[in-house]
Amino acid sequence: MTNQNSASPASAPDVVKQRPPRILSGIQPSGQLTIGNYLGALKQWAALQSQYDSFYCIVDMHAITVPQDPAELREASVRNAALYLACGLETKHCTIFIQSHVSAHSELGWILNCMTPMGWLNRMTQFKDKSAKMQADSIGSGLFTYPTLMAADILLYQTDLVPVGDDQKQHVELTRDLAQRFNSMYGETFTIPNVMIPVAGARVMGLDTPTAKMSKSEKADGHAVFLLDPLDKVRKKIMRATTDSDRVIKFSTDPERAGVNNLLTIYQAFTERSREDIEAQFDSKGYGDLKKTVAEAVAEGLKPIQERYNQLMGEKGYIYEVLKKSADRANEVASTTLDLVRDRIGFVKPLR
Ligand code: ATP
Ligand code: LTN
């Protein structure tokens, strides 16, 4: 994993200097989680949890920046909580909570909206990509201000480190800029967070279109491997992945060879082996062998996650209990920061 801003140390205001370093990250409950979400986010969350006080969020308020079916949103939120646990997050290290359970996110989101220059938001590539696929009159303003809510998520917890996939780097940079802007306008308030991107799996590409990011809201059948796909289906999807006619099995940045590169990258991330080792393994092998081997590695990686998930979904009461306890803790931490922010910007303290 790389800490891409490691040159700039996190600056913490006095109120938070005496505590273990914190992580915050989140995933939208906007469909089935993919191996992209796992390799870009969840796998590194699990690897980091014992060294940090970790906050992992189910960002339902971000999910509604595009239309969602209410029943599906509710179901996906609980399912994702179970999947976070099934992927190895432990409650002794992690606060796993639903974003809308902590109202401080909306409040700080609004305050940050008011001080975010439109030009900063205009530069965000995720907005450009997502809005380009929508009808102009169905693009809500929440999609445009999405990054300020994400900044609120991060800054409320005085977060030191934000582990995400490559596509979220720009949003974390905007969060840093906003925190610096607020601190210089009103005095030290927010910790400046650093982004962390995994070395392998930072950008898993679609199996059908290896030049586009694998995304959980892309509907084409052969596009994504979902964490809860039956293992036979996982194997079939990988066997059908787009490749090329070159027959060379090497990591490559050539867009013509993106399919093979993607399969190798997925294999590298699941097996945690070096690129040299992997290239040597496939020396003089064919694409059929490559696909079969990758399919087995992915199926083997997903099997224990699915087993644990099925067990957890049989104990839904336990999941709701985790979410409740976590929301209490998240509310406590977030409201401390929010009180400080309200005071800094001149809101009158309400009588308690
Ligand atoms: P959607 O398609 O619904 O917008 P998404 O699949 O892009 O969603 P997010 O909820 O936006 O998923 O992302 C959650 C986390 O997973 C983020 O840290 C993001 O960087 C990471 N992530 C998403 N897709 C990939 C991918 N293809 N490769 C690596 N990381 C990914
Ligand atoms: N925008 C992120 C999800 C997200 C997030 C966060 C990630 C919302 N809030 C805070 C890290 C920290 C995405 O993956 N689309």
Image: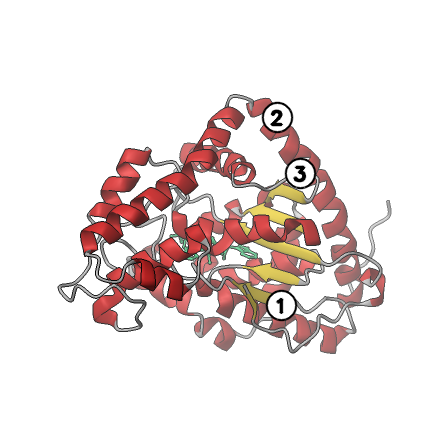
The coloring applied to the image is secondary structure
The residue carrying mark 2 is 318
For the C terminus, the quadrant is top right
Residues at discs 3 and 2 in contact (Cβ within 8 Å): no
The residue carrying mark 3 is 91
Point out residue 332 in the picture as x, y percentages from the top left corner: 76, 46
Point out residue 171 in the picture as x, y percentages from the top left corner: 52, 66
Q: Is residue 69 left or right of residue 314?
A: left
The residue carrying mark 1 is 194
Whole-angstrom CA distance, mark 3 to mark 1, is: 24 Å
Give the image quadrant in which the ligand numbered 1 is located. Answer: bottom left
- Element type where label 2 sits in the image: helix
Neighbor class of circle 3 (other Cα within 10 Å; few <14, some 14-19, many 20+) is some
Q: Nearer the viewer, residue 134 or 334?
A: 334
| Type of the residue with mark 2 | Tyr
Point out residue 91 in the picture as x, y percentages from the top left corner: 66, 38
Q: Is residue 25 left or right of residue 29?
A: right
- Residue 53 in sight: no
Please report whichever mark, 3 or 1, sits nearer to the chain's N-terminal start: 3
- Element type where label 3 sits in the image: loop
- Element type where label 1 sits in the image: strand
| Type of the residue with mark 3 | Thr
